[in-house]
Amino acid sequence: MSRTKPLFGTLLGLDHIGVGVTDVDLSLPFYARLGFTDIAFDYTGELPGLAPLTGRDTNQVRIVLVRSNNPTVLGRAAIKLVQFIDRPNPPMPAGMAWGEPGICEVCIHVNGQAQFYESLAADGHHMLMEPNEALLDPYQTHCGLSYVA
């Protein structure tokens, strides 16, 4: 990757990641368990300007921006949950997995990662990969991770 100057201004950080969901009401409790409990806004209505992207003249949506209540030196992480409410949800593409183009994961830091994983499993969430730990080169950085759908 070549180094180039930004087109406009200077990057100050990442504010949020948008995640398309099939049901905001079902998604909010899941993200609340991850620490995203501060609702910055909850909008339901027309989202203008999407016709070139969606091929539809109107787009009715529900959008909820949730922020972490536990700020870090990197700021308050946020996730924007987006649900189209004027059409059925399309099925997930067959074989879709980690590494596919688009947002394939949302990574969060938690204390007690293995215990947190077990509590999500006990809540009935679909577990994709059990917790593991490794030291990553070149600095022997501790990494513990697991995956939950």
Image: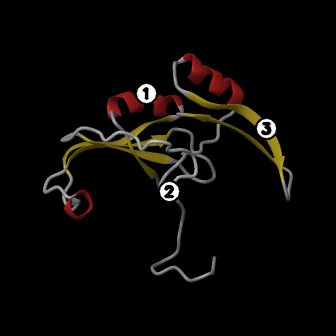
- For label 1, the residue is 29
* Mark 3 residue element: strand
* Mark 2 residue element: loop
Residue most extreme to the left:
57
Measuring from the top left, give residue 147's x and y in whole percent.
Answer: 61, 36
Which residue shows up at 64% across the image and 21% down it? 118
Residue type at the position of mark 1: Pro
The answer to whether mark 2 and mark 3 are in CB contact below 8 A is no
Q: Is residue 123 above or below residue 106?
A: above
- Of 95 and 131, nearer the camera is 95
- For label 2, the residue is 101
Answer with mark 3 or mark 1, whichever residue precedes in sequence.
Answer: 1
Answer with mark 2 or mark 3, whichever residue precedes in sequence.
Answer: 2
Residue type at the position of mark 2: Pro
Which one is closest to the eye, mark 2 or mark 3? 2
Label 3 to label 1: alpha-carbon separation: 27 Å
Which residue shows up at 62% across the image and 81% down it? 3
Which one is closest to the eye, mark 3 or mark 1? 3
Image quarter (top left, top right, bottom left or bottom right) of the N terminus: bottom right
- For label 3, the residue is 133
In the displayed structure image, the side of residue 56 where residue 65 appears, left or right: right
Label 2 to label 3: alpha-carbon separation: 26 Å
Measuring from the top left, give residue 40's x and y in whole percent.
Answer: 37, 44
Residue most extreme to the front:
94
In the displayed structure image, the side of residue 139 where residue 109 appears, left or right: left
Q: Residues within 10 Å of mark 2 (few under 14, many from 20)?
A: few
- Of 135 and 28, nearer the camera is 135
Please indicate, yes or no, whether residue 112 appears anywhere in the rendered image.
no
Which residue shows up at 86% across the image and 51% down it? 140
In the displayed structure image, the side of residue 36 where residue 115 appears, left or right: right
Which residue shows up at 45% across the image and 79% down it? 8
